[in-house]
Image (spheres, rainbow, N blue to C red):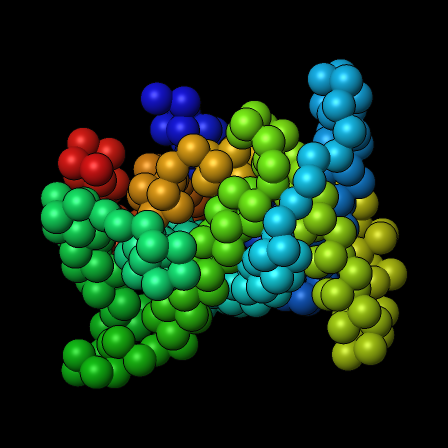
Amino acid sequence: MIWIALSVMAAAFQTLRFMLQKTLSMGPLSAGGATLARFLYTAPFACLLALGYLSWRGQGLPAIGGAFWPYVLAGGLAQILATWCVVAIFASRNFAVGITFKKTEVMLTALVGFVVLGDTVTLGGLAAICVGLVGVLVLSDIPEGAGGLLKRAMNRAAGLGLLSGVLFAISAVTYRGATLDVASADALTRALVTIPCVTVSQTLGLGLWIVVKEPGQLTNVLKAWRTAVWMGLTGLGGSLGWFTAFTLMNAAYVFAVGQIEVIFSIVASVLFFGEKITRREGVGMLFITVSVIGLVVLY
């Protein structure tokens, strides 16, 4: 099934992007600056790829429905805020755990998808999602391991992770809605029409905010182009995989398969950042990995 391959591809590109984003956020860029760099350096490539593909197919821009732009703008804002949360997580927990907290998006996407688009999941899929929830709860321990259950569930990293999950769920469902509102039978055309609209609007909106609220950050973002341009390319690769998969399948299932990113992030955490995974973190990520496998088998 092509949507599964696209989801795995998107997860791999997204892991690479977050690695680059973490590197930038640990340098001269703030969380907002690193988030802006992701969109700023993706937008030009997204526009060129869309124009090239449509020209190659010998077709103009397809018609879009009335809900397209509301979906695009809502999803773009949610993704900006969610990405900002993920970058902020890196200051509290290591790379792999930060990505795993973000994976609450899978559980939440099922709920948001049902409310917004009427997408449903099977009972088997719901059971697998609950297994993933157990993994997230295991991971919600503070680094020192002190305090009771409430304190463990209310620490900063857990809060940021859950918030990013809600926001990524909203962005996924609204992006799926936007792609479905493009009048084309070709899944790739739907994705390539939507991605530039999203990334350009995100660049303009967040760029204006950064100029007003964080003077100097835009200059730092432009100076960091040697690294940021690769973040843009990996961001485009991830977006292309996600958006195309969204046109083919329920967003909750797409993100469920995309949880393989947890495995990719462990490899990145150990090999590239020299970080160690604790026993508790390993158990939590094991639960989430089992959840991914269950969702793929039982959907």
* Residue drawn at the location 34% of the way across and 78% of the way down: 155
Residue 235, position as x, y percentages in the image: 62, 41
Residue 22, position as x, y percentages in the image: 58, 53
* Residue drawn at the location 37% of the way across and 28% of the way down: 4
Compared across the picture, whether 296 is left or right of 109 comes to: left
Q: Nearer the viewer, residue 131 or 278?
A: 131
Position of residue 80 relative to residue 250, above or below, is below
Q: Nearer the viewer, residue 263 or 78?
A: 78
Residue 186, position as x, y percentages in the image: 56, 26
Q: Is residue 90 visible?
A: no
Viewport quadrant of the N terminus: top left
Viewport quadrant of the C terminus: top left
Position of residue 240 relative to residue 75, above or below, is above
Q: Is residue 183 visible?
A: yes
Compared across the picture, whether 93 is left or right of 231 comes to: left
Q: How many marks?
A: 0
Q: Nearer the viewer, residue 114 or 279?
A: 114
Compared across the picture, whether 210 is left or right of 145 comes to: right
* Residue drawn at the location 12% of the way across and 48% of the way down: 123
Residue 233, position as x, y percentages in the image: 68, 35
Position of residue 272 relative to residue 23, above or below, is above
Which image quarter: residue 181? top right
* Residue drawn at the location 25% of the way across and 76% of the way down: 152
